Amino acid sequence: MRFLRSNKLFVCVLTCIVLAAAGCSPVYKNLQKGTGNADCIDQFRPAFTSTLYNTHVNVVGKHLSGLLLFKRMPDSSMRIVFSSEMGAKFFDFEFNADGAFKVHQVMSQLNKKAVIKTLRNDFELILMLGVRPGEAVVKTDGLYNWYGFPKKNDTYYYVTTRNCDSLVKIEHAMKRKPKVQMIMSGYKDGVPDTIGISHRNFNFDIGLKFIPR
C-alpha cells in the first residue's frame, strides 16, 4: 500500500508540473517590461530548518524513492540528504553560508558530472540562492509577473500572480526555451508542501511531498 501511495504521489506531483507548464507556455521573447516589486518574492524563499520530504526521482531510466532532508546547520550552511527509508544514502550535499557547493557523498549511479550539476542547479532554484530582489529584471506576459535573475548564459525566472500572492512556477530558462520547470506550492509557515521538478532536455523528474513531524 505504501508503494502504491508513493507512486500516486509522484504521478500527482508531475501532473501538477505539466498543468502549470501548460498554463504558461514559454513566451520569453514576448515578455514585456513589468512594474512589479521584486521584494515580494522573498515570501516564497523556503524556511527550511529540519524539513523532511517523501521523495521520488526518475533519472536516466532509474527510479529512486526515499526521504529527503533539508537541514540548516549551526554554521548557517544547508545540508541536503537523500536516503532510502532503510537509511542508505543516495546523496549528501551542502551549500555553505556563502552559497558554495560541496558533495559529501553520492551513490555511484548518480556520480556523474551532468547529474550532480543538474541537482546543484535544482537546489539553488529551490533555496533561491543568489536571488537578490534588487537585481531582478521584472517582466510580464500580461497575466503573470516574471522576476528574472541572470545566471551565466541562462535566466532563473520566478513567476507570480500580478499581485504576488501566489508563486505560479519557477523556470530555469535558456534564451528560447526552458531547461527546467518547477512548482513549489501549499506553503505553510514558510515551507512548501509540494515541490515538483521536470527537466525538459533529458529524462529527469523529481517529486517531493512534505512529511509533518
Image (cartoon, helix red, strand yellow):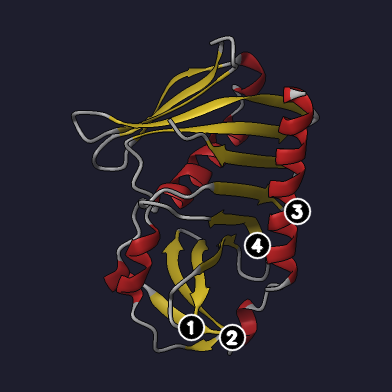
Residue 14 vs residue 189, the one in the foreground? 189
Mark 4 and mark 3: Cα distance apart in space: 17 Å
Q: How many marks?
A: 4
The mark nearer the N terminus, 4 or 1, is 1
Q: What kind of element bears circle 4?
A: strand
Q: Nearer the viewer, mark 4 or mark 3?
A: 3
Q: Is residue 18 visible?
A: yes
In the rendered image, which residue does mark 3 sit on? 15
Calculate the distance from the C-alpha at mark 1 to the C-alpha at mark 2.
7 Å
Residue at the spot 45% in from the left edge and 88% down from the top edge? 34
Report how far apart the C-alphas of labels 4 and 2 lie in the structure. 19 Å
Residue annotated with mark 2: 143
**8 sits left or right of 115 in the view:** right
Q: What residue is pinned by disc 1?
A: 162
Q: Quadrant of residue 207?
A: top right
The percent position of residue 158, horizontal first and vertical second, equals 49, 66
